[in-house]
Amino acid sequence: MTHSFTRRKFLHQVGAAGGSAAVYQMALALGMMPSKAFGAPQLVAPLNGRKRSVVLLGGGLSSLMSAYELERAGYECTILEASHRIGGRNFTVRSGDFIDEMGNPQYCQFDDQPNLYFNAGAARIPAHHHYLVHYCRTLGVQLETFTNVNYNAWIQNDAVAGGKPIRYRQFVSDARGFIAELSAKGISADAFDSNLSAEDVERVLQFLRNYGDLDPNLLYKGSNRGGYVQPGIKAPTAGMLEHGTLHERLDFSELLKSDFWQYRMHFGESEDQAAAMMQPVGGMDNIVKGFVRNIKSPMVTHAQVKDIRIGEAGVTVVYQHDGQNKELKADYCLNSIPKHLLVGIDNNFPAEYIQALSAIGRGKMFKIGIQMRERFWERDNIYGGISWTNQNIEQLWYPSHGIHSEKGIMLGAYTWEHENAEFFARLDPQQRFEAALSQGEKIHPDYRKYAENFVSITWQRMNHHMGCTAQWTPETRELYFDYLQQPLAGRHYMMGDQISYHPGWQEGAFSSAHNALSELQKRVSAELASA
Ligand SMILES: Cc1cc2nc3c(=O)[nH]c(=O)nc-3n(C[C@H](O)[C@H](O)[C@H](O)COP(=O)(O)OP(=O)(O)OC[C@H]3O[C@@H](n4cnc5c(N)ncnc54)[C@H](O)[C@@H]3O)c2cc1C
């Protein structure tokens, strides 16, 4: 109480001397302002005519958000981006776009139509990613529903049903049925020994009956949740005007061999994959375009940073542009260059900082987008969502947008398993296409005949990325996470999803940028107060 009174009194004195801006700066620095308030007018206090400059390294979302906020507060900003485009791993590919993969440069051959795009990097937005949703709202980026889990999509596993694809709904319902039956038998047998009362046992059995759709004798005999078989009808469910025949149950021992029920079946319940999910209408890069429209500061592409020097008075960055080395001095530097590339750039960082950046592993990811001349999956009652397979392609995605239009872009492979991502990295683009088609044929036998063209991306070979999601371990988090959140000499601030608890998510990039801005704010507030 005494402490807060003292701080308030102190702020009053600051106000008398420096006016309302000085009070705002100081309150932020003292942690007295709700700096995490979403929709707050500004994350950074206005400079009110005082001069401060920031160089932002990398043109991904963490830099864009930071530049947007800093510029509004009166900071002079410059974004330096090594590649030919702004956006980083927020990358939507359309007709004519260039994919700068080392050794496998490609140009996208898709037809030039608004719904024929492929989100080669970020693709889905969980509704609870506050910053992301906030900036979509603020920048006027329209969102639509993204279907992640689709009960009509397929599961294909060579160990189950002779490798024939099975509807997701059948797999889930049989897996739950078998487990519920086993548990019900166990709990009935143990009822007298367990600590549960007779009523509790009955409640648990009631739950299991519902969970697994068991019959009154607690046996799983199949369920209409898994769908019906109707001769000549492809639909997974039927029985509107006649009763229909339930699918035969899958063989439990085969099902046990499938990794789907151990892991993928719960994919859509994980923290960041659970409904409701969204996507920007027209492509994920509409978020990038929204920022670009609203940032006036220079964003220099083809500007590869070569040297970073942190000094007493500011930061000096050397970058290569138009075949020349250019130098830029700024008061502060916000840096989102991928950490495994950053350690190879000349710098005067402390040795332990380099050690921390080097200790974090880098992920590998592969995606292929295929233009299909017809939306054949819609005839299979599939609208959006994912089919899973235990082959290298791992996933097929059906577009959630453009429903009932003529063509569509399917995601023909998406893998973050190192082995599978490396399988595709070793192939040239045409071989990747062939592998994706032949594996996809196990799910959609006439798949190939619809495929018109494709683009593939191996993120561990993409120029200026050479990797994807940062791979932290509990040990590296313990040793380095907090350290990397802290500025170097009050001048250099590390950013990016790579130093968040959600690497591989745009929200991680925004959150780390928020942290960097808060640290910068503390620094500037202190400087201005002492001045
Ligand atoms: C396949 C894939 C799927 C994903 N799925 C999702 C998803 O569904 N939802 C979601 O929210 N997120 C997803 N993400 C993650 C999301 O894309 C990232 O979290 C976010 O875009 C990272 O932004 P960033 O600013 O931290 O880094 P980046 O976007 O990586 O930006 C770093 C920038 O630094 C530049 N750079 C590198 N070296 C230099 C240099 N020497 N000089 C200057 N610039 C340099 C790079 O070119 C790059 O533009 C996915 C990413 C990938 C690759």
Image (tube, rainbow, N blue to C red):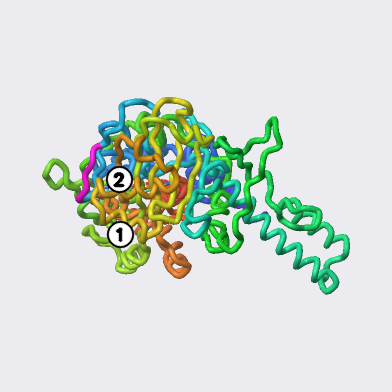
Q: Position of residue 366 (x, y in %)?
A: 35, 51
> Which residue is tagged 1?
340
| Cβ atoms under marks 1 and 2 closer than 8 Å | no
Judged left or right of residue 183, residue 66 is left
**Can residue 13 be seen from the camera position used here?**
no
Q: Which residues are magenta?
A: 103-107
Of residues 367 and 353, which is closer to you in this image? 367
Q: Main secondary structure of the magenta part?
A: loop
Secondary element type, mark 2: helix
Residue at x 39% of width, y 51% of height: 393
Residue carrying label 2: 433
Amino acid of disc 1? His
Q: Position of residue 374 (x, y in %)?
A: 40, 30
| Label tally | 2
Residue 88 falls left or right of residue 442: left
Q: Position of residue 19 (x, y in %)?
A: 49, 37
Quarter of the image holding residue 485? bottom left
Outermost front residue: 231
Q: CA distance from mark 1 to mark 2?
A: 29 Å
Sequence-wise, the earlier of marks 1 and 2 is 1
Q: Residue at x 30, y 45 (%)?
A: 433
Quadrant (top left/top right/bottom left/bottom right) for the N terminus: bottom right
Label 1 SS:
helix
Structural crowding at the residue carrying mark 2, measured as other residues with C-alpha within 10 Å and reported as few (<14), some (14–19) or many (≥20): many
Q: Is residue 207 magenta?
A: no
Relative to 221, 147 lies left or right:
left
